[in-house]
Each structure stands twice: as C-alpha cells, then as structure tokens.
Image (spheres, rainbow, N blue to C red):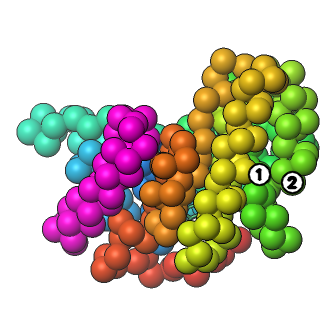
Amino acid sequence: MKRKLVENLKRVEDRIHAACARADRPRESVTLVAVTKTLTLDVIRTMVDMGFTDLGESRVQELTRRAAAIDEWLGRRARDVAAGAKPRPRWHMVGHLQRNKIKTLLPWVDTIHSMDSLRLAEELHAHGEKTGTVVPAFVEVNVSEEPNKHGVRVAAAFHLVEIIQGLDHLKVVGLMGMAPHTDDADQIRRAFTRLKELHDEIIDERVAGECFRCLSMGMSNDFEIGIELGATHVRIGSALFAGIELAPQAVPTE
Ligand SMILES: *Cc1c(COP(=O)(O)O)cnc(C)c1O
C-alpha cells in the first residue's frame, strides 16, 4: 500500500509542478489537501508518516473520528524516540456542513471549505465566540450554477463576504468552488475563471480583510486547470488513492 501511495503521490506532484511551471508560480503557492474520505485509518497513518500535512474530509463524523485517532496515535508515538515525531496534520472540512454538526466539528477542524450560507456563518461565529476561537473558512460558491450543487449563487457571494466580514470569530480566507463534472476543459475553465474573477473583485473592492487570499479550486479531474487559473488549494482524492484499499464502511451514514 505504501509503495502505491508513493507512486501516486509522485505522479500527482509531477502534475502539480508542471501546472505551476506553466503558470509561472512556485510550487509552495499551492497547498495539496489530500481528501481521504474512503480510506482506512491505516492508510491515513501511513500518509502522516510520509509527510502529508493537509487532510480533507467531507463528513463531520469521519473527520472528528479520524482526527481524534490520529492525535492519539501521534501522542503514543511521541514517546517513541526512534519513530521520530511528526507534526499533527491540518484537517480540512470540504463537504457540506449542517449547522447542528458545528459543535462536534469545531474542536478538530482547521479550515472549513464549505461555508455556504449566512446562517451557517453566524452559527460558526457564535460557536467561535463561545469557545474563544476564530475559524478560518472559505465561502463556497456554486460557480457551475447547477441546482443540485451546494454553494451560494455567484450573484450573492460578494454580498455574503461583505456581511460576514463583520463577524469577528470567523476568518474568511477566500472562495471555494467546483467545476461541473465533465471532461470538457473549456467548461471547467469557464467556471474557474468566473470564481477567480469574483475573488479578485472582492479583493479589489476591499470588501474582505487581509487574510482573504485563497482559492480552493481543483480536484483530481481538473486541478491543473485550477492551478493555472490561480488556485492556492487543490483538494485531491481519487488521483492519490487509485489502487488503495478503502474502508469497509465507505457507505454514507449521515
Ligand atoms: C471528494 C471530494 C474531493 C476530491 O475529489 P476527487 O475527484 O476524488 O479528487 C474534493 N472536494 C470535495 C468537496 C469532495 O467531496
């Protein structure tokens, strides 16, 4: 399993480097978030060992369970000098977030990529206030304008960022968006260009604060286009995990 992971990672890294080179950007300007949703804990431990620093999950229950298990494992390992200490990975919530799950999620999550309504933002702010924390979050925009997709409408995003800016236990770090599920590169490019333009407009109009700099844009199928158009975060699952065993309960439970 580790050999397969190393191979897949090498292939993905080569593609990230090539896309960065085409866009004349340094590799460090892009964070690889490895979306581990269907993997076993054993695979995730191996990844942490290999030096993966940013892990993504689409379900609250999986994220909290895994983050707790990895913390516990790292804690045990810290006492074993020979194994060498590894830093705790950062956990990214990339899937749709329900307000009633916020309380469970917040102690474990480092960044939320899927803030898609004012009510969710207000609730995150309220919990942040209660616990004395500031939650970094991306506003998710439905750039493909497909009715079954999450995210705020393109026309509403600007205003939402403006309002959220006033909530001081929330840190809006940028925008997240998904291209339509297609092999048509032009269609993907159009969706990502729209997100990038919206992002730049928010910065130019000084609607958001200093920390609004990130664009979470690109998955296994389209991350190169995302990087060429300015993505700072790519969320990659299947390209990293092809040929690796999945968790037995890979079926949705929420
Ligand atoms: C699963 C998932 C990903 C990763 O998708 P792949 O196509 O497997 O790379 C990225 N973002 C979100 C929101 C996801 O749910």
User: In the image, which residues are magenta?
Assistant: 1-30
Amino acid type of disc 1? Answer: Val
Residue at numbered disc 2: 153
The answer to whether one can see residue 133 in this image is no
Residue 171 position, x and y percent, is 70, 27
Q: Residue shown at 85%/37% (left/top)? A: 158
The answer to whether one can see residue 86 in this image is yes
Magenta span includes 29: yes
Given residues 235 and 60, the one toward you in this image is 235
Asked if 222 appears above or below 130 in the picture, the reply is: below
Element class at badge 1: strand
For mark 1, does the 10 Å Cα neighbourhood hold few (<14), some (14 to 19), or many (20 or more) residues?
many
Asked if 85 appears above or below 176 in the picture, the reply is: above
Q: Which mark is residue 141?
A: 1
- Asked if residue 113 lies left or right of residue 69, the reply is right
Q: Residue shown at 21%/71% (left/top)? A: 4
* Quadrant occupied by the N terminus: bottom left
Q: CA distance from mark 2 to mark 1?
A: 6 Å
- Asked if residue 60 lies left or right of residue 13, the reply is right
